[in-house]
């Protein structure tokens, strides 16, 4: 058993966890979603026309569609061309089908071509037409869940799937006052705490484990050295947990923690430097007035 104990953060997103995250995006303390949405609302037309640079765009999104934020960019693209191909890439076929139905119904002119792929492992896209350019969307600060080295590799894989002249829009959360970060990851209504503990609910259901959910406390910590928000679950007591599906008994000391998530926060210019290293030319970065979130447009060299 590794110490400190940890669980991978992709485990959060079962059906209940995805619903809880959706709720998080609407709580007042969680500035991330609404700040990025405000940037995209203000600049969608500009982002699309700059990426297109005279050609027709085909949009790829890593993840099954970040709801209204993706819609803003698709709507801006439909304004410029009759038909927009939209390729959401996700491991979950059901999430892709849901995104397809939602988007084709809401934005006439968008043709959804779902791709069931794990973009962290492989990203193979069909060739585009001569007259087209690809625009990959990787928004929502999803890159923040990756260690810096993994994030760099991910950008390199995206670059390798593109042709010169294609573009990437990357949304990254920026370093800000610790008090704002702590509130965003430990909201007063306790939704983030429930999201964090849901990982144990899932282990109970899927591995037949016997975690006493209430005996684990939600902790949000700002790790300044590594520039990341961390989430942990702290055992309130000394206890044993049994995971029959793994034939595993796990002991917890009082106060012992499970590390469940890292959410990296970038410094201004850092995302652009990583994009440049990955073989992109960063063209433009849009930041909100408070300097909390950055949306970077970069072109494959
Ligand atoms: C979906 C990874 C962008 O890191 O802010 C929200 C997940 N964790 N509250 C983030 C999350 C706690 C979120 N991302």
Image (cartoon, rainbow, N blue to C red):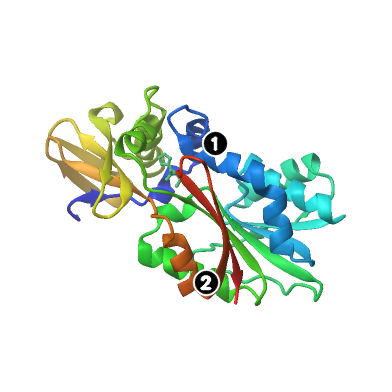
Q: Residue furthest front?
A: 289
Quadrant housing the N terminus: bottom left
Query: Within 8 Å of ligand 1, the CB of disc 1?
Result: no
Q: Is residue 198 above or below residue 87?
A: above
Which of the 4 image quarters holds residue 215? top left
Q: Quadrant of ligand 1?
A: top left
Q: Residues within 10 Å of mark 1 (few under 14, many from 20)?
A: some
Left or right: residue 269 compared with residue 99 = left
For the question of whether residue 73 can be seen, the reply is: no
Q: Which mark is residue 34?
A: 1
Q: Nearer the viewer, mark 1 or mark 2?
A: 1
The residue tagged with tag 1: helix, strand or loop? Answer: helix
- Mark sitting on residue 157: 2
> Residue 174, position in %: x, y?
42, 49
Q: Nearer the viewer, residue 166 or 90?
A: 166
Q: Compared to 151, does 261 lie above or below?
A: above
Secondary structure of the residue carrying tag 2 is helix
Q: Is residue 270 visible?
A: yes
Q: Position of residue 96 (x, y in %)?
A: 65, 50
Residue 262 in the image: x percent, y percent? Answer: 34, 50
Residue found 60% across the figure and 63% down from its top:
168
- Taking depth in this image into account, of 182 and 252 the one nearest to the observer is 182
Q: Earlier in the sequence, mark 1 or mark 2?
A: 1
Residue at the image point whose x is 27% and y is 43% from the top: 222
Near-viewer residue (10 or 225): 225
Residue at 20% x, 56% y: name it: 2
């Amino acid at each position: 058993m590794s110490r400190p104990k940890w669980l991978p953060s992709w485990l959060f997103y079962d059906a209940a966890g995805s619903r809880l995250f959706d709720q998080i995006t609407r709580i007042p303390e969680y500035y991330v979603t609404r700040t990025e949405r405000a940037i995209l609302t203000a600049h969608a037309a500009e982002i699309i026309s700059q990426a297109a640079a005279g050609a027709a765009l085909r949009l790829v999104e890593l993840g099954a569609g970040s709801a209204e934020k993706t819609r803003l960019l698709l709507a801006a693209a439909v304004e410029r061309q009759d038909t927009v191909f939209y390729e959401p890439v996700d491991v979950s076929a059901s999430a892709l089908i849901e995104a397809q139905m939602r988007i084709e119904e809401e934005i006439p002119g968008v043709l959804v071509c779902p791709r069931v792929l794990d973009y962290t492992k492989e990203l193979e896209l069909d060739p585009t037409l001569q007259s087209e350019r690809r625009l990959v969307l990787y928004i929502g600060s999803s890159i923040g869940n990756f260690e810096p080295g993994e994030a760099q590799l991910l950008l390199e894989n995206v670059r390798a799937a593109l042709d010169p002249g294609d573009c990437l829009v990357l949304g990254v959360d920026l370093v800000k006052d610790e008090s704002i970060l702590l509130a965003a990851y430990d909201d007063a209504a306790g939704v983030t705490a429930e999201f964090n503990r849901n990982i144990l609910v899932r282990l109970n259901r899927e591995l037949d484990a016997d975690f006493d959910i209430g005996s684990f406390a939600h902790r949000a910590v700002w790790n300044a050295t590594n520039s990341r928000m961390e989430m942990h679950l702290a055992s309130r007591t000394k206890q044993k947990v049994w995971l029959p599906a793994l034939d595993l008994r796990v002991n917890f000391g009082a106060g012992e923690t499970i590390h469940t998530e890292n959410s990296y926060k970038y410094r201004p210019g850092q995302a652009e430097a990583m994009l440049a290293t990955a073989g992109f030319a960063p063209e433009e970065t849009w930041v909100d007035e408070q300097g909390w979130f950055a949306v970077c447009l970069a072109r494959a060299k």
